[in-house]
Amino acid sequence: MEAYSEFAHVYDLFMDNIPYEEWCDYLVMLLNKYGIQDGLVLELGCGTGNMTEALRKKGYDMIGIDNSEEMLAEAMEKGIEEEADGGPAALYLCQDMRKFELYGTVRAAVSVCDSMNYILDAEDLLQVFKLVNNYLDPEGVFIFDLNTRYKYEHILGEQTIGETREDHCFIWDNYYDKESGLNEYVLNLFIQSDDGRYDRFEEVHYQKAYDLEEIRGLIERSGLRWEGAFDAFTLDPVREDSERIYIIAREHGKKEKDRREVK
C-alpha cells in the first residue's frame, strides 16, 4: 500500500497508452448491466483521477479515494480543469481503502487498474470488502479488476520495461515470487530538472496475485453477494490465460429502509 510519490507527477505521461475511455465504456456497460445508470459512485484507488473524471462525464456523481496525496493533487487539478463542462465536481479523499470512511452510502463502488492487487494480505482485502458492503446502498454493486496469477507468472514476472520521453524516462523491473504470489516492482525514474540534468528517483511497490476462488471466498465472508467474474473487457468467462479479470459483487444484508448515514 505504499503511496506513489515522485511518480505521481509524471504518471499520466507514462500512462498515455492506457485507453481510459474504452475502459470507462466497459465499466459503464457493467454498471448498467447490474442496474446502476446514475447516482453516487465511489472509486477506490483512484490515482490521478482518470477514471473518476471519465465516469463523472458519463453522468455519475463521483467520490475518489486514494492514499497518495501526490496522486490526489494531480486528480484535483484535473478536476478543476474538467469542471468547465458544468457538471458537479468529484470529491477526492485521501484515505487508506482498508479503513476508509464515508458520510453515507453510495449506489456503486468501483476499482480499476489493479488497485486491489496492492492489498497484500487476504485479511486486509476482506476488510476492504466489508467496508464496501457497509457503504453500499441496498442492492448496490461493487465492480473491480485484478491482475491474474497467469499475468504475473507469464507476462510480468522477471521482465524489465522501459520508456523514454522528451524529459522523463523510467525503468521498471519486475520480480515475481510464485510461492508467495508477490510481484515486486522497482521503478527507477529519471526526471529532467530546469538546468537540464536528470534527477533519479526510486520507488518500490508490491502487488499480490489472488486466485479466483480465494477472492470469491473473501467476497462471501465479507457479507457481499457474489454475482460473477469476466475476462477483462468482455462478458466471457474467466480463462486459464486471462491476464486481467473483472469481478462483480452486490450489497447484501440491508433493506431499502436501512438507507441512511453510515458511521
Image (tube, rainbow, N blue to C red):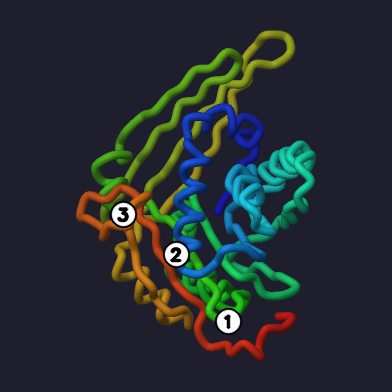
Nearer to me, 190 or 259: 259
Picture layout, residue 102 above or below residue 234: below
Type of amino acid at the residue the image marks with label 1? Pro
**Front disc: 3 or 2:** 2
Side of 183 relative to 66 (left or right): left
Residue 231 numbered mark, or none: 3
Picture layout, residue 86 above or below residue 62: above
**Pointer 1 local density, CA inside 10 Å: few below 14, some 14–19, many at least 20:** many
In the displayed image of the protein, which residue is found farthest to the left?
240
Quadrant containing the C terminus in the rendered view: bottom right
The location of residue 14, given as percent across then percent down, is 53, 28
The location of residue 3, given as percent across then percent down, is 61, 47
Q: Looking at the image, tell me whether mark 3 or mark 1 is earlier in sequence order.
A: 1
Q: Looking at the image, tell me whether mark 2 or mark 1 is earlier in sequence order.
A: 2
Q: CA distance from mark 3 to mark 1?
A: 27 Å
Do the CB atoms of the residues marked 3 and 1 lie less than 8 Å apart?
no
Side of 42 relative to 188 (left or right): right
Type of amino acid at the residue the image marks with label 3? Asp
Q: Secondary structure at mark 1?
A: strand
**Pointer 2 local density, CA inside 10 Å: few below 14, some 14–19, many at least 20:** few
**Residue carrying label 1:** 138
Q: Residue at x 79, y 39 (%)?
A: 84
